[in-house]
Amino acid sequence: MISDDTPRGATVWLTGLPSSGKTTIAAAVATRLRERGQRAEILDGDDLRRTVSAGLGFSRADRDENVRRIGALAASLARDGAIVLVAVIAPYAAARAKVRDLHAASGIAYLEVYVATPLDVCARRDAKGLYQRHAGGEFVGLTGVDDPYEAPTTPDLRLDTHDDPVEISAKAVDQLLGAVSESRQF
Ligand SMILES: Nc1ncnc2c1ncn2[C@@H]1O[C@H](COP(=O)(O)OS(=O)(=O)O)[C@@H](OP(=O)(O)O)[C@H]1O
Ligand SMILES: Nc1ncnc2c1ncn2[C@@H]1O[C@H](COP(=O)(O)OP(=O)(O)O)[C@@H](O)[C@H]1O
């Protein structure tokens, strides 16, 4: 039931492989929201690994801790009224489920968006040269290549960025938020 105490914000978690388009789509959604005067915050994995998750690596335990911290931060911002766009791989389903549960426990809207770009397309895009460095033997444990990525089985939205341009994906997220906000009045 909606009351005056119901949080007005929401968290949208964009999960997907490196270079799938999480950051690009989050930015496009934020632009759309801000143009309408809505408060949008972007939480990006790359940035947060330099601050709130500094010192964490890419083991399963560290990735889970990273996701837990970012989930708590997102919930806090959403509780304060922001639309929070999280662009973080979050490769493990159990860690993602915990973030969903944390939001549910506080009555905060939570949407999981699967940026379902296939590995070969991500590797061709290679926005940060990660796939190339991995192929060159510079490091091991790249998500989707030789480290796990547990794809969402029941996301709230799936984006096929190899078929759809950025603006179509951003519009789909915006429309999903609109549908949720109508039912929750944020
Ligand atoms: N081994 C390995 N695997 C995956 N990603 C790697 C790795 N090493 C560095 N990077 C870079 O770190 C970004 C991923 O950070 P995240 O916080 O989103 O990852 S995670 O949810 O904790 O798994 C990720 O950013 P995105 O490309 O934006 O996804 C990479 O640029
Ligand atoms: N339809 C699309 N949707 C999102 N990104 C796209 C699309 N087509 C090409 N790209 C490009 O793919 C790259 C994705 O990089 P980025 O957004 O940093 O991914 P991630 O945050 O998932 O690592 C960018 O260079 C972006 O311009």
Image (cartoon, helix red, strand yellow):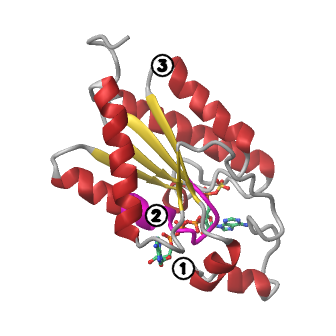
Report the residue at 21% width, 52% height from top.
Answer: 34
Mark 2 crowd level (few <14, some 14–19, many ≥20, 10 Å Cα): many
**Does the numbered disc 1 mark a residue whose Cβ is under 8 Å from ligand 2?**
yes
Q: Nearer the viewer, residue 88 or 1?
A: 1
Tag 3's secondary structure?
A: loop
In the rendered view, would you say 127 is above or below 178?
Answer: below
Q: Could you tell whether 105 is left or right of 96 in the image?
A: left
Q: Give x and y (percent) for residue 79.
A: 37, 27
Can I make out residue 96 in this image?
Answer: yes
The magenta region covers 15-27
Q: Which residue is mark 3?
A: 106
Q: Amino acid at mark 1?
A: Ala
Tag 2's secondary structure?
A: helix
Distance of label 3 from label 2 (alpha carbons): 26 Å
Q: Amino acid at mark 3?
A: Ser
Q: Which residue is mark 1?
A: 127
Whichever of labels 1 and 3 marks the residue nearer the N terminus, that label is 3
Report the residue at 71% width, 84% height from top.
Answer: 133
Q: Could you tell whether 122 is left or right of 177 in the image?
A: right
Q: Which residue is mark 2?
A: 23
Q: Could you tell whether 101 is left or right of 175 in the image?
A: right
Whichever of labels 3 and 2 marks the residue nearer the N terminus, that label is 2
**Does the numbered disc 2 mark a residue whose Cβ is under 8 Å from ligand 2?**
yes
Q: Amino acid at mark 2?
A: Thr
Q: Give x and y (percent) for residue 64.
A: 71, 44
Q: Quadrant of ligand 1?
A: bottom right
Mark 1 crowd level (few <14, some 14–19, many ≥20, 10 Å Cα): few
Q: Nearer the viewer, residue 159 or 28?
A: 159
**Does the magenta run of residues contain 24?**
yes
Q: Are marks 1 and 2 in contact (CB under 8 Å)?
A: yes
Tag 1's secondary structure?
A: loop
In the rendered view, would you say 93 is above or below 20?
Answer: above
